Image (tube, coloured by chain):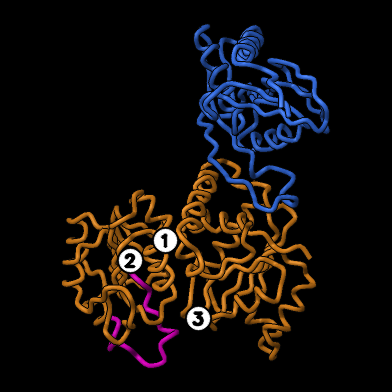
Amino acid sequence: MARKDFLDIESLDSEEIIPLLDQAVPFKDLFTRSVKKVPALKGKTVLMLFYEPSTRTLSSFEVAAKRLSADVIIFDVPHSSVTKGESVRDTIDTLQAMRADYIVVRHRLSGQPAAIARQTGASVINAGDGAHAHPTQALLDAFTFREVFPEMERKKVLIMGDILHSRVARSTSLILKKLGVEVAFCGPGSLLPQTQFRRFTNYEEAMAWGPDVVYLLRVQKERQDAPFFPSDREYHQVYGLTDERLARIAGEGIYVMHPGPINRGVELCDAVLDYERCLISQQVENGIATRMAVLFGLKPTKS
Amino acid sequence: MSLALDESEITEAVTSLADQIFKKTHEGQVDLVGIRSRGDEVAERVRDLLSEKGVSVNFGVLDISLYRDDYEHLVQNPKLKSSAIDFPIDDARVILVDDVIFTGRTVRSALDAIFDYGRPTSVELAVLIDRGHRELPVQPTYVGKFLETKRLDQVVVRLKNTDGEDAVELT
């Protein structure tokens, strides 16, 4: 039976993850055709419900849905009645009348997409909820990783930065672990929660662990009520990819990933973007293909 | 269940297909596109026979899963595979190849799919087996073998590379 919703990585096992990654391959192949669109979801409606600002996840989903020929409605929350005090529940009831088949939700509260999924027959996709999960990001990261390392098992990924506030760190580490990849975290002690994974507070020690990929996280100023580190400049010197560190990474052939949007001069120096083993733009393209696979794989409940 | 075609009859049908296509070859060039699954294997065999006769063959494979008209009725969407057409479809004289033609819906999907790759000069259709009962106005140009069936019969085609043996069964 096909799933109705796509809410987190936790509830997927590797027998479900691998076919999902496989399904994304033919979608990526479409991007080289002159017509990049297929009629698979013709006449279906995808509703984008973003309670938090997002440019790239929103447009990635929009492109994915449109390449499947679905109609896309972007529900502009900052300018909606939500700011007039309407509850999420009432909003969903109103939107039900639009008969959306798929609802893509981003919300600052963990668990909100799951609550919506219980309320509607539409397929709900979690596009990020609080510090909980960002499962499509995890999927595109795993897909990108597998393109470089098809075997995956026993490879090492070092996730670096603000682990505490990052749903990307949570979801991506989880999917990689399920695929047999070794994961470790590196970051300031104040941003490094207790986890099952190996933890480093020192960059040199983390690199001595021998990662195949260094995954940089965005410093999320909007989620930090109080400063967790003194300044951008200091962060860059201690946990950022500086020019000197890039030289060593290039020497060892280590790949670099980042979920975007990047803060130049904080997580990474400009030169990283020209580094041949930087996978950032590949991640963006793969995001569309994997989101197409997710949309195509779900089955809304018929009303 | 009864055997409708055995190995030698399948070979005969493929040979007949290749002969018919060969007679109408335009400037020694044929552009074959096999429809997954099994249409690709039929197309491979036709390609090999035409190549032996000195015809230059472009070969591609088309997966039409994203162009089907029956998602609403499926509990699970079909497993996708990649299409692989690495010659230009613009101005090509495409021959679509499939194992069986029945309702004609697969061919309808394949026509939609092929036009998303470009604008061919012409499109023809070659099938190993025509079992009748069309629901759409689609007719093959080349037929390996006509098979008389009832509407509810199932025609099961098994081919060596895909299924390990050559046989067509009627159930």
Total numbered badges shown on the rendered structure: 3
Q: Nearer the viewer, residue A96 or A155?
A: A155
Secondary element at tag 2 = strand
Mark 3 and mark 1 in contact? Answer it, CB < 8 Å: no
Q: Splitting the image into 4 quarters, where does residue A206 fall?
A: bottom left
Residue type, mark 2 in image: Tyr
Q: Earlier in the sequence, mark 3 or mark 1?
A: 3
Chain bearing mark 1: A
Taking the image as shown, residue A299 lies to the left or right of residue A34, namely right
Mark 3 and mark 2 in contact? Answer it, CB < 8 Å: no
Query: Alpha carbon of mark 3 to alpha carbon of mark 1: how far?
Result: 19 Å
Instruction: Give the answer, above or below, for where A78 lies relative to A259.
Output: below
Mark 1 and mark 2 in contact? Answer it, CB < 8 Å: yes
Residue under circle 2? Answer: A215
Residue type, mark 1 in image: Asp
The numbered disc on residue A130 is 3
Residue under circle 1? Answer: A141
| Magenta segment main secondary structure | loop
User: Does the magenta-highlighted stretch encompass residue A229?
Assistant: yes
